[in-house]
Image: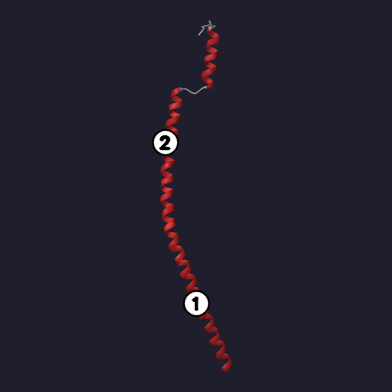
Amino acid sequence: MMRVLVPVRLRRAVRGWFDSRYISVADHRQDIKDALWEVQTLRREVVTLQQEVRQLTSRTGDAQRLSKETADALDHVLQNEVLVWQAIDGLKERS
């Protein structure tokens, strides 16, 4: 490696330029800590969301069963209503 004499003003200017272009080690460490904290926070949120999805999935079966039972019950109610109106119409015709 060869050394070259560089004037102090030029050396300061180049160092200033490099310092302004690159992040310091301390800043880099802090950025890594912040990123790690965000990753851990996101990991906790993902775990929470996975638990919620599992709960909703278990409720899906119940919701489907209840909707089918409700549809069957409503079908019976409508059939009975038709029978009632047919009976009413039959009584009107007799009178």
- Residue 25 versus residue 89 in the image, above or below: above
Disc assigned to residue 23 = none
Q: Residue at x 57, y 94 (%)?
A: 94
Please give the residue where the numbered disc 1 appears in the rendered image.
Answer: 77
For the C terminus, give its image quadrant: bottom right
Q: Nearer the viewer, residue 50 or 17?
A: 50
Q: Position of residue 57 (x, y in %)?
A: 44, 56
Q: Amino acid at mark 1?
A: Val
Residue bearing mark 2 = 37
Element on which disc 1 rests:
helix
Residue 10 sits in quarter: top right
Q: Residues within 10 Å of mark 1 (few under 14, many from 20)?
A: few
**Secondary structure at numbered mark 2:** helix
Q: Is residue 90 left or right of residue 37?
A: right
Q: Is residue 7 above or below residue 56?
A: above
Q: Is residue 63 above or below residue 37?
A: below
